[in-house]
């Protein structure tokens, strides 16, 4: 699996294509698209972290260094070399990221990310198969600009 390359055109929902597209989306700040590949239980927090970072965090390169398949090809442990910088610091950082991807209903979902400025908590106590499927619990979409929406009730928080 290659890293950040020109002509990036992943095909299908195979692991290779999904991982390439996910990191491409991180690099170019397509936060909604990147978060849509994170386990539903952690997707909203991941998207919020990306939005908090996106004003001054920039990914310059990424490279998949190692892929270990487990669970009869339904789980992948991936080590990624990520190069990034923040506008608040002149230092380019290089981090070793450890990701876990799992196959649910023929879709690869990121269930764990360790290293670098982001984190997806690994839920080791529960069976990953018991997590909500992406089609059941997609991250909430942002309202369209100028859209009218209800405000929460100040008394109840609802």
Image (spheres, rainbow, N blue to C red):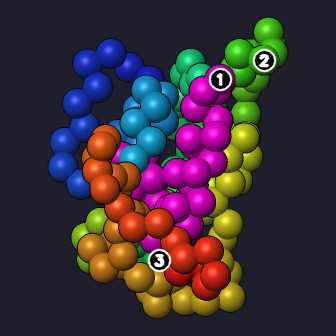
Q: CA distance from mark 3 to mark 2?
A: 42 Å
Residue 88 locus on image (x, y percent): 78, 17
Residue at 46% x, 90% y: name it: 130
Instruction: Name the residue tied to disc 2.
Output: 88
Left or right: 100, with 106 as reference point? right
Q: Over which residues does the magenta segment extend? A: 33-57
Instruction: Name the residue tied to disc 1.
Output: 56
Labels 3, 2: front one? 2
Q: Quadrant of residue 119?
A: bottom right
Is 56 inside the magenta-drawn segment? yes
Q: CA distance from mark 2 to mark 1?
A: 7 Å
- The image quadrant where one finds the N terminus is top left
Q: Out of 63 and 40, give the one closest to the viewer.
A: 40
Q: Out of 74 and 147, give the one closest to the viewer.
A: 147
Tell me which numbered mark, 3 or 1, is placed earlier along the sequence.
1
Instruction: Name the residue tied to disc 3.
Output: 71
Labels 3, 1: front one? 1
- Compared to 24, does 84 lie above or below? above
Residue 50 locus on image (x, y percent): 57, 42
Number of residues whose C-alpha sits closer than 10 Å to that of mark 2, classed few (under 14), some (14–19) or many (20 or more): few
**Does any portion of residue 98 appear in the rendered image?**
no
Badge 3 vs badge 2, beta-carbon distance below 8 Å: no
Q: CA distance from mark 3 to mark 1?
A: 38 Å
**Does any portion of residue 127 appear in the rendered image?**
yes
Residue 87 locus on image (x, y percent): 71, 15
Q: Out of 131 and 10, give the one closest to the viewer.
A: 131
Residue at 58% x, 32% y: name it: 54
- SS label for mark 3: helix
């Amino acid at each position: 699996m290659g890293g950040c390359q020109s002509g990036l055109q992943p095909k299908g929902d195979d692991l290779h294509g999904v991982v390439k597209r996910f990191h491409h989306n991180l690099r170019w700040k397509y936060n909604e698209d990147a978060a849509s590949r994170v386990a539903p239980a952690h997707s909203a927090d991941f998207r919020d972290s990306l939005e908090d970072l996106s004003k001054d965090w920039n990914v310059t390169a990424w490279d998949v260094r190692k892929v270990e398949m487990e669970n009869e090809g339904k789980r992948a442990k991936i080590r990624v070399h990520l190069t990034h910088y923040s506008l608040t610091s002149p230092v380019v950082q290089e981090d070793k990221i450890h990701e876990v991807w799992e196959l649910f209903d023929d879709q690869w979902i990121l269930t764990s990310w360790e290293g670098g400025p982001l984190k997806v908590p690994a839920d080791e106590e529960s069976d990953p198969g018991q997590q909500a499927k992406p089609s059941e619990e997609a991250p909430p979409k942002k309202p369209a600009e100028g859209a009218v929406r209800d405000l929460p009730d100040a008394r109840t928080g609802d």
